[in-house]
Amino acid sequence: MLATDAALCGAAPAEVTRVLAERDPEAVAGAVTELGAGRTEAARALFRSFGTCSITDPLTELIELDLIPATVLA
């Protein structure tokens, strides 16, 4: 989603690549939190999918980063 936002904001391909390469969960969570409602909505409108072999791991990680409520898995 952050890479989608970067592309929407006119970032060069090298910058989008840098965003995709970020692996620090705290940095990613902080950047997502700072997007604000308008940019989040715009990125979500174009962000279509991501791949994973697990169903719950992405949700668990989002909960651990306080990006979604724990009730999602309840």
Image (spheres, grey):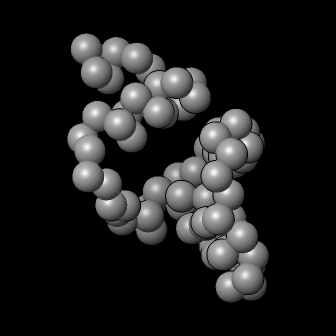
Residue 61: in sight, yes or no? yes
Percent position of residue 9, x then y: 71, 72
Residue 36: in sight, yes or no? no
Q: Which picture quadrant has residue 11?
A: bottom right
Q: Is residue 50 above or below residue 33?
A: below
Q: Which picture quadrant has residue 8?
A: bottom right
Percent position of residue 12, x then y: 74, 84
User: What residue sits 40% from the left and 29% below the top?
Assistant: 60
Left of 38 or right of it: where is 57?
left
Taking depth in this image into account, of 20 and 9 the one nearest to the observer is 20
- Quarter that holds the C terminus: top left
Taking depth in this image into account, of 48 and 45 the one nearest to the observer is 48
Extreme-bottom residue of the structure: 13
User: What residue sits 26% from the left and 52% below the top?
Assistant: 53
Q: Is residue 65 above or below residue 28?
A: above
User: What residue sits 37% from the left and 61% below the top?
Assistant: 50
